[in-house]
Image (cartoon, coloured by chain):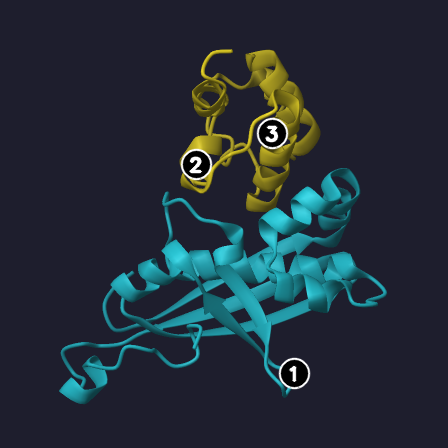
Chain colours: A yellow, B cyan
Amino acid sequence: MNEEIRAILKEHGRLSTDVAALADDSDLYQAGMTSHASVNVMLALEGKFDVEFPDRMLKRGVFESVASIRAAIEELTGGR
Amino acid sequence: MGRGGLVVGTDLVEVAQVAHSLQTFRERYLTRVFTADELAYCLDGRRDPARHLAARFAAKEATLKALRQNDEAVDWRSVEVRRRPDGSCEIVLHGGVRALAERLSVDVLSVSMSHDGAYATAVVIAEQREKWRLPASRLARKTPRGAYER
């Protein structure tokens, strides 16, 4: 799953650093992701994993790292 | 946010990024980020809707910065840019962001937006009332000026 998340971040995250060089817990906002880019990342994740982020998950912390995104996706998919 | 001061928030959005979002996600992007009123204005025959949408996104983010929002859940549609009859714009808050502003005693939100070429920008100033200096009649007022939906 991490590689799929990284592919989405590479396409939509507008990171100023190579996503492959980031650790799973690296701060994506510190790596250059803007708020607007985080919306695109969210929409791309929803399409890729067939989920919808509920309002309670529309927070900075959910999209701040590969690890936090993975945790959110796993919660939404229930491990399917 | 401290007590009784003015706090400014600003944001800059590249118009091309909004155009990219429109092209890639279309309806999902529009309906997850913007309110019906915002879409009605920005899409109603505008030559370049992305510019107007970008300015509104900048205003939403600038508002959150002015409110010093950190990691609370935020529906982007809960910060709405609404046009007044005279053409000026105001920020209207809904849901959790409205509750946040009330907790912070933010009395007024003023917004200014602009776009030129590749970029759109917005500045929002949040005015926080000074509870300890205001008369009781003012403190009892439930609807702050300009900031909230009436």
Using the numbered discs, state the Cα–Cα distance from disc 1 to disc 3 in whole angstroms.
37 Å
The residue where tag 1 is placed is B87
Disc 1: host chain: B
Question: Which element is circle 1 on?
Answer: loop
Quick check: do tags 2 and 1 share a chain? no
Return the mark for residue A46: 3
Locate residue B32, reporting x and y percent. 59, 47
Question: Which element is circle 2 on?
Answer: helix
Q: Relative to B143, is B12 on the left or the right?
A: right
The residue where tag 2 is placed is A57
> Residue A5: which quarter of the image?
top right
Locate residue B106, reporting x and y percent. 32, 70
Using the numbered discs, state the Cα–Cα distance from disc 2 to disc 1 in whole angstroms.
35 Å
Q: Residue at x 60, y 21 (%)?
A: A49
Q: Relative to B69, is A20 on the left or the right?
A: right
Viewport quadrant of the C terminus of chain B: bottom left
Q: Relative to B5, is B65 on the left or the right?
A: right
Question: Which element is circle 3 on?
Answer: helix
Locate residue B49, reporting x and y percent. 77, 60
Q: What kind of residue is marked 1?
A: Gly
Q: Residue at x 52, y 52 (%)?
A: B76
Q: Is residue A34 visible?
A: yes
Residue A57, placed above or below residue B6: above
Is the residue marked by circle 3 packed among few (<14), some (14-19), or many (20+) residues within 10 Å?
some
Viewport quadrant of the N terminus of chain B: bottom left
The mark nearer the N terminus, 3 or 2, is: 3
Total marks drawn? 3
Return the mark for residue B45: none
Locate residue A55, reporting x and y percent. 45, 42
Q: What kind of residue is marked 3?
A: Glu
Q: Disc 1, disc 3: CB below 8 Å?
A: no
